[in-house]
Image: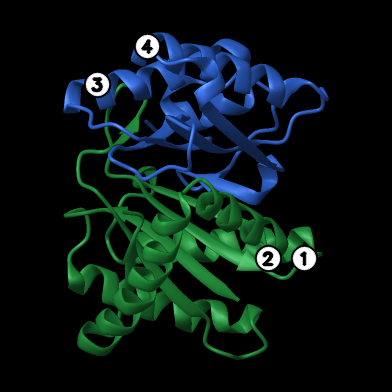
Chain colours: A green, B blue
Amino acid sequence: MRINCMYPEGRLSEDDRRLFQRALKETLEIFNSGRSPLVLWCRLEADHLFRAREQSGLVSVSVILPDGTDARTRTAVLQSVNNQWLALGHDDRDLMVAALNQSMFATVQRQMLARLSTCARIGFVLRTLVNLIRSRLSTGLAEYTLN
Amino acid sequence: MPLYNVAVRGELTQAQRSAVSLAVIKAHCGETDAPEHFVNVYVQDRVSLKADTQCHVNGVVRLREASDANSRIASAVSASIASLLNLEETTIDIVLTDIPASWAMEGGEILPEPGQEGGWQGLMERY
């Protein structure tokens, strides 16, 4: 299981992210055969995310599940993520959660890479790996950006 | 849901980014029953897109029964962005991925199935 959290820059403090990450890991490991799931943070440029007609502070959490996960588990995962968000004092109107199939998420990732020129694609992959490792070592949060 | 990622090669002002998001929202809602409030758009500019592509749109939308639903949404979004940014539609790539409504939650509620407009009421009351 992997969890991908997207948030606009400035929307969540480092403490907010750390607390939410810990809650997600603790809560969702029961859906992951007792293993702690990997949490990745994708930081979006501030002011570039819109909802309806306004700038948005929406946080989007995608939980990547094995293909064929049953509907009851999927619903329980969605509810667990939402509950943890609420428990930390956030408003669930600012949260979107999706429980996606592994193969589907991989396809979307491939599409996002395929849109780039060859040079940009190589640069993005290298930059993302460096960012994930560096941020994980310095803050405990594995972070990357789409840029 | 839906969540669109719009990437353009050129640089956009904040007003243009807002206009792009509005164009996507209007195109999406013009083809579906989704209330505008639940359409999310992330606009990236200065993206090194592959050759001959000026704009790339990646959207995750709710699965619909009609087999041509996604192509209609894609056409509407593409035309809308082309008109706004003065681009040839052939330079706009758009990819939509659909997921069952029951795989997503907003505002603490599982999303209603497309066509079940009444399903939005409970959600809308929370916003």
* Tags 1 and 2 touching, CB below 8 Å: yes
Q: Which mark is residue A102?
A: 2
Q: Distance between the Cα atoms at labels 1 and 2? A: 6 Å
Q: Which mark is residue A67?
A: 1
Q: Residues within 10 Å of mark 3 (few under 14, many from 20)?
A: some
Question: Which quadrant is the C terminus of chain A positioned in?
Answer: bottom left
Question: Which quadrant is the N terminus of chain A positioned in?
Answer: bottom right
Q: Amino acid at mark 3?
A: Gln
Residue A93: where, in percent of width, then height?
37, 42
Helix or strand or loop: what does disc 1 sit on? loop
Q: Amino acid at mark 2?
A: Gln
Query: Which residue is the site of mark 4?
Result: B86
Q: Is residue B49 left or right of residue A57?
A: right
Q: Are marks 3 and 4 on the same chain?
A: yes
Q: Distance between the Cα atoms at labels 2 and 3? A: 35 Å
Residue B16: where, in percent of width, then height?
24, 21
Which sits in the foreground, B104 or A135? A135
